[in-house]
Image (cartoon, rainbow, N blue to C red):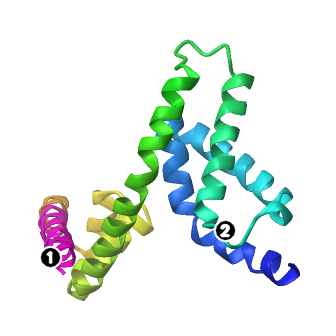
Amino acid sequence: MSDDVDSLAPQLIQCQQKLYAYILTLVGDVSTADDVLQETNVVLWAKRREYDPSLPLLNWAMRIAYYQVLAHRTRRGRARVRFSDALLETVAAEAEPGLDELDRRRVALADCVHKLPDTDRDLIRLRYDDALSAGQIADRVNRSVDAVYQAMRRIRLALMRCARAQMTTEDAR
């Protein structure tokens, strides 16, 4: 059992994006999703010895996340808009299958980014990894702001077409 518990940390790290997407679907707010994900990770680690490695880790983690969302809602019961627990359960059940599709899209997009020419990939990195504005990117690459906007628009369209084509090809297999 010790080996199973020791291997849990890397597996939990691997499922963080899907777990976050699931929580965000349930709470609808980035800040709340961040808080609930942290709370969920604390509970997951505290209950790590209860995890049955023969079962999918993500399903176990999502069930705990669901209960953390309920606990968070109870603590913040004074919120103006409050959905019923039945509605939350319905949303949770419908969100689970969508995570696989989201992961497929993420993988397809990452593959398409790798296929971009270096200059385009650099623009994407500056915009999304470094979170620079179009003006900051223009200064950095010695181009006009309009040229950066045009390039980003062209790159986004190319990525969208590439990812769609890649997913269509995968579906046809």
Please name the residue shown 51% across and 43% down the image.
24
Question: To which quarter of the image does residue 116 belong?
Answer: bottom left
The residue under label 2 is 12
Element carrying mark 1: helix
Name the residue rendered at 21%, 77% in the picture: 170
Could you give the CA–CA distance between mark 2 and mark 1, rounded to whole angstroms? 32 Å
Instruction: State the image coordinates of residue 14 (x, y, percent, origin top left).
Output: 58, 72
Q: What residue lies at 17% left-to-right and 69% top-to-bottom?
A: 155
Quadrant hosting residue 56:
bottom right
Residue 6 horizontal/vertical position (percent): 81, 79
Question: On the picture, is 67 further left or further right than 121?
Answer: right
Q: Decide if residue 46 is in sight here.
A: yes
Give the class, few, some or many, for how many residues have Cα within 10 Å of label 2's Cα (few <14, many ≥20). some
**Which residue was labeled with disc 1?**
172
Going by the image, does 171 lie left or right of 53? left
- Give the answer, above or below, for where 44 lies relative to 110: above
- 3 over 142 or under it: above or below: below
Q: Please check the rendered image and state whether residue 159 is part of the magenta-colored stretch, yes or no.
A: yes
Return the x and y of residue 46 as percentages of the image width and height: 85, 57
Task: Give SS at disc 2.
Answer: helix
Instruction: Tell me the quadrant of the picture where the N terminus can be found.
Output: bottom right
Q: Does the stretch in magenta take in 32?
A: no
* Amino acid on which the number 1 mark rests in the picture: Ala
Magenta: main secondary structure equals: helix
